[in-house]
Image: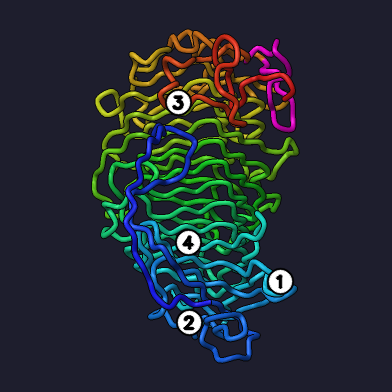
Amino acid sequence: MKCKFRVIVCIVLSLSVVTGIFGNGGAFFFGECVRATSTSYYVDNAATGSNSGGNWDNAWQSFADISWAMIQPGDTIYISGGTAGQTYNEQLKINKSGTEGNEITIRTGQEAPHNGRVIITNNNGQTGYLGDGIFVNGRSYITIDGSLDGNINLIIQNCDTNGIDVSGNSHHIAVRYVEVGNNGNERLENGVLLNYASGVENQDLIMELSNSKIHDNRQDQIRITGSRGPNMFGRVQIFNNEVYGLYDDGIECGVRGVDIYNNHFHTFNRHLASTDHPDGIVTAAGYVRVHHNLLYDLYSSTPDEFFGNNLYLGLYNNVDASPVEEAYIYYYNNVVIQPVEEPNALNVSNKGLELGGHTNITSLSNVVIANNTFIGTPGLGMSLDFGPRNDSTLDDIKIVNNVVYNCGRVLSIGAVLLENNQYSQFDVGPDDSHKVMFNGNVINSGSEGNDEIKYQNVILTYDAFVAQTGTQTMGGNFDPELLPPGYVPADEDSPVVNAGIGYDILGTYFQDDYAGTPRPQTGNWDIGAYQYVSGY
């Protein structure tokens, strides 16, 4: 039933929020004005009533019929999925903004006979933004919630261009419980596109994408671009998603302030162009946190195709190519598992993690690559190329507690690469008094890989590398004794248990493992993504 009047009440929220900026994510809290009443509206393309939107009988009969002038902050628009699913072959364009604490919410029907799956498929031969499934441009405080009893009930598929497009000065956009698949007819079209403008530089949250499935879209599954952004964490939150069927990248991100965590990435579809370089997660800027992600089976079995990097810190300024400094890049508690079957020869470039920097990145500092587990990559387990940077432009780089096991199976240049492109010496050592700290890592050849390290363009045995650099006073090249399929420590006697760098170095950044288990359990931190507990 529609409201006859609207009342606004101001509420002062007194909150004590203890949340470290290096946490595992969380809720956003605001002190705000909250409306005491809100209105529900309805869309049903099978309705035959007055088309006024006020109830299911008289629901708007298309997205184009929505009277956005009637919609106010705090209102909810419900979309009918009928009894067994309902398709809307048109674009849902959001034409109104909410306010802080009074978001405009788009939801699927929650009760029978309107709680079937809602399918948006805008395949009417349109190009550009007109071909998007859901389009949000310059709007704020919008929630798109496709959940029904904790399950996905909103599908955006087979659209001409992007599945979801959030552009311009949009901010505080939340997208939850949606499936976005098989969108785009040509390259440069994505599953979810976030392309924000400089007008939102002062906003603490641009977008949240969570609890969704993103798959088989024709370019990147998730693409985040636009203004490079301020020096701030957590402005874009990507978490609890399943991303699969990659054509190009799982996530490509060229902006600061992105958190990517608790996601699963798997399976490669195919190339659409010979120039594609598909990767799992790509970040090109600072103030990013990539953690607690699982990446597996990302490879191509087609003879003329390849898959690139699972985790790619490909630093560059893609906004205006001007020189920039980058800092605060944290990759931790990620698990990368590739199959032991022999891939095609082009998969030699398939690496666990690659760090590389374009010349327009003038300096690099405050980088943490810690407690990741890399299993079975055909190429390098970790490729750490600091580009043109040396001691004067590098600072506070920590590469610690990582497991590199059975990697370098095809590409015979070692399991780990550590160099700059000038092949000049830089300050690397076992503790954080050095520009680059390299310690507590386990690099083991497994059954098919190797434990060599390419250091300053020379391939060294593990022992020769340690002797030359003085690194690795902890860790080693021993068998980590991890159990598949998750590659957790086999038991409390596994050599990675209590063997890693601990809280004094890493506790500022994180204090748990991939599964959320607190570190340490007994003694010191374990090496790798998992901290051993009985029952794993």
- Residue that numbered label 1 is attached to: 112
| Residue drawn at x 67%, y 57% as measured from the top left | 149
Is the Cβ of the residue at disc 2 closer than 8 Å to that at disc 4?
Answer: no
| Residue drawn at x 28%, y 46% as measured from the top left | 230
- Residue that numbered label 3 is attached to: 418
Mark 1: secondary structure: loop
Image-quadrant location for residue 86: bottom right
Query: Disc 2 or disc 3, which is closer to the eye?
Result: 2
- Residue that numbered label 2 is attached to: 66
- 487 in the magenta segment: yes
- Residue that numbered label 4 is attached to: 143
Amino acid type shown at disc 4: Thr
- The residues tagged by marks 1 and 3 sit, at their Cα atoms, a distance apart of 59 Å
Q: Earlier in the sequence, mark 2 or mark 3?
A: 2
Q: Who is closer to the viewer here, 378 or 396?
A: 396
Is the Cβ of the residue at disc 4 closer than 8 Å to that at disc 1?
Answer: no
Name the chief secondary structure element in magenta: loop
Spot occupied by residue 243 in the image (x, y as percentages of width and height): 60, 52
Q: Which residues are magenta?
A: 479-496
| Residue drawn at x 45%, y 18% as measured from the top left | 438
- The residues tagged by marks 3 and 4 sit, at their Cα atoms, a distance apart of 44 Å
Q: Earlier in the sequence, mark 2 or mark 4?
A: 2
Is the Cβ of the residue at disc 2 closer than 8 Å to that at disc 3?
Answer: no
